Amino acid sequence: MNRPHGGGFFLSLGRGAMLRWVVLALFISLCAIAEAQNKKKVKTATAPLSRGWGKNIKWVKSFEEGLSESAKSQKPLMVIHHLDNCPHSKALKEAFVADKSIQKMAKDDFIMLNVVEEIGDKHLAPDGYYVPRILFVDPSQTVRADIVGKYEERLYTYGPDEMELLAANMKKVKLLLHSEL
């Protein structure tokens, strides 16, 4: 079979070599697609709703979902505002996770939400936007602004050494809920 000159690289290779190049290109494409899908899976798998605040606790995705679940279950909603890169938030998270009574109450008696971005509801920032900040919302969707920590300038913050106060406030919220409803 006579081939004209100037037919290009692929024509000069022959069918066997050209088939190998096509298979190689297909293989590389499949590997790239698989890698992209794997990255998507890893990204979603590493971002659980707990964000490290307690893996045995059921966490809701949004404030709206929290309000809805609170109304259905008649449990108060506990909203934890924090930032991943804030040392005070990290210290609070570690203390929160280490306290078994808080973890049990959070799991059994509350609808739980932790957020790293502001929700936009001014009622969840009665004294300003700062982190860490913990507020409680009762099933009637009333923010319990009367349940505070020990700091006058940041009423809704708790330090890592104040888990006893947080636990007492969680119990107080539960008692108020039963006495007011």
Image (cartoon, rainbow, N blue to C red):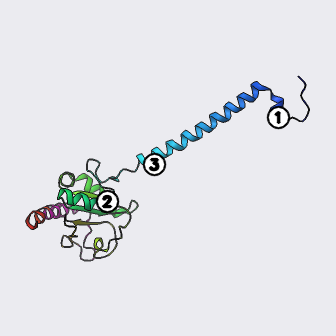
- Who comes first in sequence, dot 3 or dot 1? 1
The residue carrying mark 3 is: 43
Q: Nearer the viewer, mark 3 or mark 1?
A: 1
Q: Which residues are magenta?
A: 151-173
- Identified by mark 2, the residue type is Asn
Mark 2–mark 3 contact, CB under 8 Å?
no
Q: Residue, x 29% and y 62% (percent of image)?
A: 80
Q: Is residue 160 visible?
A: no
- Identified by mark 1, the residue type is Phe
Q: Position of residue 123 (x, y in %)?
A: 28, 73
Instruction: Examine the structure image and report whether residue 152 is included in the region drawn in magenta.
Output: yes
Q: Nearer the viewer, mark 2 or mark 1?
A: 1
The residue carrying mark 1 is: 9
Mark 2–mark 1 contact, CB under 8 Å?
no
Above or below 129: residue 103: above
Q: Residue, x 51% and y 43% (percent of image)?
A: 37
Q: Position of residue 76 (x, y in %)?
A: 19, 61
